[in-house]
Image (cartoon, rainbow, N blue to C red):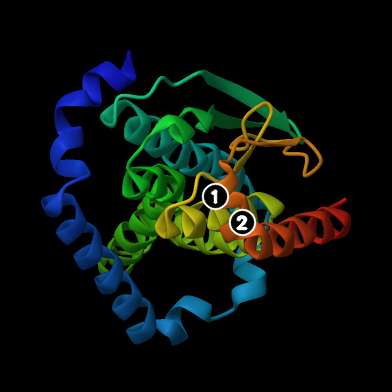
Amino acid sequence: PILRVLAPVTPWLFGAVGLAIWLLVVLAGVLALALNWGAFTESFSERVLSLQNLTVVGIVYPFVKLAHELMHALALRHYGCEVRRVGLLFVAFMPVPYVDASASMTLTDKYQRILVAAAGILAELFLFGVAMLVWACAEPGALRTVCYNVVLLTAWVLMCQAMDARTFFALYLCSVSLAGGAGIMPVNGWDKAGFDANQLRTSVSIKSVEVFTPIRASTLALLICSDCFLI
C-alpha cells in the first residue's frame, strides 16, 4: 500500500528535480558537518556510548533502514519491476526491514539497474544531509539528539557496507552495467540479509563472458575474501 501511495512522487524523485534536491541537501550537510566538527565530536565517546543514547540508536536505526529499503522498492516500482519480497528480520532483537531487489536484473537499461542498486545508499546520504542540517540549527533537546544519531548511524552503516560482500557485488553490477554486460546474480536475490557468495549462477552471454572474465574473477575473489573476514 505504501508503494501505491508514494507512486505519484517517484517521477520527480528519480528525475532531474530529485537529483538537484539530493545534491543540494547532501553537499549542505557535508558543509555543515565541516563547520561544526568541533561541536559535533565534543565528548564523543561519552555521548555515543551512554545508555540513553544507545536507546535512541535502537529506536532510530530501524527507521533509517526502512528508508534505505523503501528507496530500493520505489526504484523498482518506478521502472516497472516487481517487488518480489519484503520482510522484517530481527537482529539482536532489533527489527530490520529488507527488500528483494533482484528483479532489477530484468531491466534492459543499465542506468536504471544502477539506480535501483544505489537507491538505498542515496537515501541514507540524503538522510545524513537532512539530519546534519537540522542538528546544526536545532536547540539542544530530543530533536537534536535524534538528528545526531541519524548522522552517526548513516555514516556508520555506510562504512560497514563498504566492507560488506554485498557492496562489492553491487559495485560489480554497476560496473558491468556501465560497460554493457549482463553480469551475474545470486539464486535467491542478492539484496537481502544472508547473502552467500557461493550462491551465484551465471546469466551472461558468451560475449559478456569473454569481455568480463577478469572483472568477474576479481570480484568473486573479493566476495569470498570479505565473506571470510565477516564470518
Q: Which residue corresponds to the image point at 60% horizontal and 65% vertical from the top-left?
A: 159
Q: Nearer the viewer, residue 118 or 135?
A: 118
Residue 64, image x, y percentages: 47, 44
Which element is circle 2 on? helix
Q: Nearer the viewer, residue 182 or 115?
A: 182
Q: Can residue 203 be spotted in the picture?
A: yes
Q: What amino acid type is highlighted by mark number 2?
A: Glu
Position above or below: 187 against 157 = above
Residue 13, image x, y percentages: 20, 43
**From the viewer's perspective, is 62 left or right of 113?**
right
Question: For the residue carrying disc 1, how many other residues have a C-alpha within 10 Å: few (<14), some (14-19), or many (20+)?
Answer: few
Q: What amino acid type is highlighted by mark number 1?
A: Lys
Residue 34, image x, y percentages: 37, 84
**From the viewer's perspective, is 228 left or right of 143?**
right
Residue tagged 1: 207
Residue 176, image x, y percentages: 50, 55
> What's the mark number on residue 210?
2
Cα separation between marks 1 and 2 = 5 Å
